Image (tube, rainbow, N blue to C red):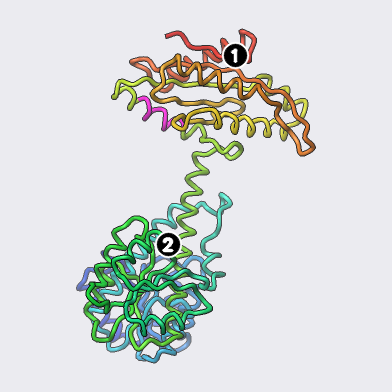
Amino acid sequence: MTARVLIVDDLVPNIKLLEARLTAEYFDVISATNGFEALELCRDGRCDIVLLDVMMPGMDGFEVCRRLKADPATLHLPVVMVTALDQPADRVRGLDVGADDFLTKPVDEIALIARVRSLSRLKVMLDELRARVVTSANLGLKDAADIIRSDAGDNGRILLVEDRASSADRIVAALRGLHKVEVETVPQDALFRAAEGNFDLVVVGLTLANFDALRLCSQLRSLERTRALPILLIADPEDRPRTLRGLDLGVNDYILRPIDRNELVARVRTQLRRKRYADTLRENVQAAFELAVVDALTGLNNRRFLETHLSSALDQAAHMGRPLSLMILDVDHFKAVNDTYGHDAGDEVLKGLAQRVRRVVRSADLVCRLGGEEFVIVMPDTPLPIAAKIAERVRSAVQSELFQIDASGHAIPVTTSIGIAERASDANPDALLRRADKALYDSKTAGRNRVTAAAA
């Protein structure tokens, strides 16, 4: 997977060295020699990943990273610190300002490519989610950028897969009071627990006895329920090849033994904050989809959804040679309700009607609000005589009880007129709707509060 990589370093030879390595792997490379130039390039959307030198004049890498993560336009950019500093305290400081990883000079070529590829996959996934919710703010949905900036990255539910008791005890002690950690010593059971346990992070010891830890990581990535679950590897320094292989398999991050508590806490915090950011984006995608196809007042599917669903339902019925019927219902004298009691009362009637209809139709039937006081019910595998019985049940449910229209308990009677039609051999959605609508008109002219079936 290729990506646009921004190299930030005040020394041109360092830039040229990294550029040559990345270009050989078909990454696009741009560069900046100071923090201010780097911030401008990032805000302009010119890069996917930032390789950031720490020791620079004017503005060091820590400050550049902090500003990138504080800006909603750039907080999603993965940042890798490239530094001669190799102390745990330096890594913790970088993680605290939002860095995703560290590469120590002189940079190892294999580690560089593995980490850039890993972060490229993450960036593509986040970009897809961000593109789908670009209008979220206008729709009144949660701002994922605000959430990640305000999230402290604590109170996570973590599954630790480690069969060495001493190692597990140290990790649990390091995270105690910050997160809830559950230990699984049997790797074969870890996959099931991860899929069923609603965890925020899986921490996997790479040196599991009698089991390949990377196999578990691969299985976690292959299951739909755990595909987006972050994975943090605990590795020994000599396990470098397998650690890099883990990044290729989709592992999110790793930490080397001996484990520094502050670094572990910081890496866990980073993964939790990133997961919650991605979760919020996914929730916004789902919410935006629902807003597009769901009527806000009644909670039913709207006309847009009906048009798509009815067309495919008719095609399927025709292909299988199965019946399909459609019902249109209209609230009788609804304008009088609005004129007499107000539009708020009318809204309460529509919401109450939607609830009653849902209670009496079958689970396979699709109930939609067509617009105003008109509703449509699509009934698959339903011939006209059965549709007439369902329609009569709907009519009776609407008439049977008064509708409460305000908080004081004031209630009014409401009835509905209904028209039904069954698909013809050559029917299309518009023709079926017209026939049902004609039957609805016949119900109204015949006195309302009744069901009329369209002629075959």
Is 130 included in the stretch rendered in magenta?
no
**Tag in front: 1 or 2:** 2
Amino acid at circle 2: Gly
Task: Give the residue pinned by disc 1.
Answer: 450
Label 1: few (<14), some (14–19) or many (≥20) C-alpha neighbours in 10 Å: many
The relative height of residue 162 versus residue 127 in the rendered view (above or below) is below
Relative depth, front residue between 66 and 184: 184
Amino acid at circle 1: Arg
Is 309 included in the stretch rendered in magenta?
yes
Q: Quadrant of residue 398?
A: top right
Q: Quadrant of residue 186?
A: bottom left
Kindly report the secondary structure that dominates the magenta region of the rendered protein: helix
Disc 1 to disc 2, C-alpha distance? 51 Å
Please tell me which residue is depicted at 51% across the width and 35% down the height of the picture. 301
Is 310 situated left or right of 140 in this image?
A: left
The range drawn in magenta is 306-314
- Determine if residue 6 is in view: no
Quadrant in the picture for the C terminus:
top left
Task: Give the residue pinned by disc 2.
Answer: 197
Is 282 situated left or right of 192 in this image?
A: right
The relative height of residue 408 versus residue 63 in the rendered view (above or below) is above
Q: Which mark is residue 138?
A: none
